[in-house]
Image: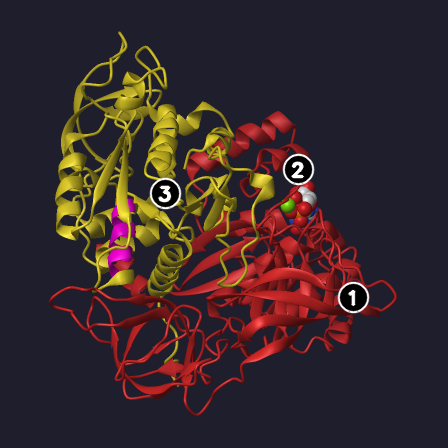
Chain colours: A yellow, B red
Amino acid sequence: MHNDYTITHLKQLESEAIYILRETAAQFEKPVLLFSGGKDSIVMAHLARKAFWPAKLPFQLLHVDTGHNFPETMEFRDKYVEELGAELVVGSVQKAIDEGKVVEEKGARASRNGLQTVALLEALEEGQYDAALGGGRRDEEKARAKERFFSHRDAFGQWDPKNQRPELWNIFNGRKQHGEHFRVFPLSNWTEMDIWQYIKAEEIELPHLYFSHERDCFVRDGVIMGVTDFIELLPDEKVEKMVVRFRTIGDATCTGACLSSANNLDDIIDEVAAARQTERGTRADDKRSETAMEDRKKQGYF
Amino acid sequence: MSEDNNSGYLDMDLLRFTTAGSVDDGKSTLIGRLLYDSKAIFEDQMEAMEVSSKARGDENVNLALLTDGLRAEREQGITIDVAYRYFATPKRKFIIADTPGHIQYTRNMVTGASTANLAIVLIDARKGVIEQTCRHSFIANLLRIQHVVVCVNKMDLVDWDEGVFNKIVEDFKSFASRLDNIVDVTFIPASALIGDNIVEKSENMPWYQGPTLLYHLETVYIGADENHVEARFPVQWVIRPHSDKYHDFRGFAGRVAGGVFKPGDAVTVLPSGFTSTIKSIESMDGPQEKVFAPMSATITLEDEIDMSRGDMLVKANNRPDPTQDIDAMICWFASDKQLAGSGKYILRHTTKEVKAIVTEVCYKMNINTLHKIEDDLTLSLNDIGRVKIRTSAPLIADSYKSNRITGSFVLIDQLTNATVAAGMII
Ligand SMILES: Nc1nc2c(ncn2[C@@H]2O[C@H](COP(=O)(O)OP(=O)(O)O)[C@@H](O)[C@H]2O)c(=O)[nH]1
Ligand SMILES: [Mg+2]
């Protein structure tokens, strides 16, 4: 007998993520979904639509804007949010800088990625959110491999890897003291490959940056970077036209591109299957030290 | 060309497994090998590993560094927390819960085992079946992992000797006969370091005719592990759109914990006892004909009846009895507090939260010898014991043996909100 009762790995992951999204809505007073316009957050928003359909999302979307975005991402973000009928709140790193809450790094290698943490914590406090849904995946990086679905943060937003709540079966403990909050990661068990396969299976629309295109680029520390208004070139760096696509799209100052001619989902899936570099391997911020991610997470980064 | 590469994935299913072994049995090396040979290790990770292996003075690239991610773990060279790892072959996607094997990490093993379909128990061929082997198998059995692979590792260090392997098989079988939740045990002689019988068949052990570890993981049948008979649907959330188009829509959202639900089924809401009929099973992709575990679903009923989070939808002809008294095996998770009789806690079971008192600790297990301890009834971190619990409101529960979701719960400390115990209802 062909087993009637098995479902594909994508359906299992979808079902699990929907379960987590519903638990989050039920266990917290004011959750928020972090939405950057990147593929993981688009998949999250798609899953959230499915989880609460035909009702609207029972939470707002929050974008922590470094101000250093590729313009394509912002256009996509606004269009997507409008179609979704959701409410988008924008937390701004520029504002944190202007208000003197953080000091911007100087020089050609300056990145606002570190400042994002401050802006994020500010935005969470201002909006009085008690849970923030993020698109983090455990396969992205080794410190994330030990992250929980419901990740408890103290009143300072910090993560203590040695003091995490055990998670068993389908049971998630979101109880907290006043002032504490949670990060919730419904995509914990997904890999980059699962994300792409799901995008294809569900016909989810993505910003064009993910597909091959020609762009002015330069190479820094072995990473291909797109030329934008926010990055100063070093004296020996040359601008060249390259055919590239992005595997992640975050802050434009620290997100690398890869040479690629993949301009449709099938080609991207083939490319991911054959890839010999992790997605984060193209991110300059993780290269700073071996435990860079763990250290950033302890401070309150995603 | 892309067709060939991609066409398989829609048929892929998912296997979750856990690995247990004592320190230095080769667990991290084994996982590293599976990831490496299935190409789930990337160049940049490999480069980072080479750099740190050199810095530590290791001769070969230390595949264990791939799984030991936290700073403290890398410094001490041990695995502390549960780490989740992922890899896929064209047949299956795998989720590995990599847990430390030391007795002081029993709670991590229990956590990793709670969602696993299969456990790999590692044995060092030179040491044979030891206390730790019993403990790891006991935990797999307690958490009702139905499939066990006993991987006899480091065969290269015993000259690939069939006799050594056979002795271990006999020793394991003689004690595992008591572990009645384990329905299928497979024995594989291997060398994780060299790669024999992990992904590639061993040329050093022509006497072994069985599958390689990866082949077994890809093909073991787990379709019968879920309970598809007793229908259970814990309600998580009620969907009320309040829109013109869906004015009267009231959908009960949840994840099926057991059995099969179809439109037209006669159902009962527990604990209230109201009955109705399933009108439809809704989704953004259109109505569904049936849903079963572990699918998330939205169910609508023919009648307007009162039902909300914490209630459970069951079939009218198969209803568990709501109860306020449960007997359970629990594993204690708190490092700073012990459980003694009459402790008060919050108990979370499916989507319901109630108050609970542990009225009695019946016995504690010596999990190395599987003997009962009756003269010391205090449960401390990592202890496993049998208790009686009284709850403030009725639970709609099954035995853990018949359903892992409706048969499990956690205890939460009322002051700190920490999860202090995991329980399995008897
Ligand atoms: N000779 C031999 N050594 C092995 C084998 N598997 C692991 N080792 C070595 O045993 C030591 C402990 O391995 P590790 O994977 O860290 O063990 P863990 O503590 O169980 O994670 C390391 O030095 C490995 O290289 C094997 O099959 N044969
Ligand atoms: Mg290890």
**Helix or strand or loop: what does disc 3 sit on?**
loop
- Chain to which the residue tagged by mark 2 belongs: B
Instruction: Give percent across and percent down for residue A253.
Output: 28, 23
Mark 2 CB near ligand 1 (8 Å cut): yes
Dividing the picture into quadrants, the one containing residue B164 is: bottom right
Q: Main secondary structure of the magenta part?
A: helix
Front of the two marks 2 and 3? 3
Subunit under mark 3: A
Mark 1 CB within 8 Å of ligand 1: no
Q: Which residue is mark 1?
A: B364
Q: Position of residue B268 (x, y in %)?
A: 40, 85
Q: Is residue A23 above or below residue B85?
A: below
Q: Nearer the viewer, mark 1 or mark 3?
A: 3
Verify whether residue B347 appears in magenta.
no
* Residues indicated by labels 1 and 3 sit on the same polypeptide chain: no
Lateral position of residue B251 relative to residue B342, left or right:
left
The tag on residue A129 is 3
Marks 2 and 3: same chain?
no
Q: Can the viewer see residue B389?
A: yes
Badge 2: residue crowd in 10 Å (few <14, some 14–19, many ≥20): few
Q: Secondary structure at mark 1?
A: strand
Q: Quadrant of ligand 2?
A: top right
Query: Which one is in front, A112 or B411?
Result: B411
Range of the magenta residues?
Answer: A41-50
Residue annotated with mark 2: B77
Mark 1 belongs to which amino acid? Answer: Lys
User: Going from the N terminus, do you reach mark 2 or mark 1 first?
Assistant: 2
Q: Residue furthest right?
A: B375
Q: Is residue B197 left or right of residue A195?
A: right
Q: Nearer the viewer, residue B52 or A299?
A: A299
Of tags 2 and 1, the one toward the viewer is 1
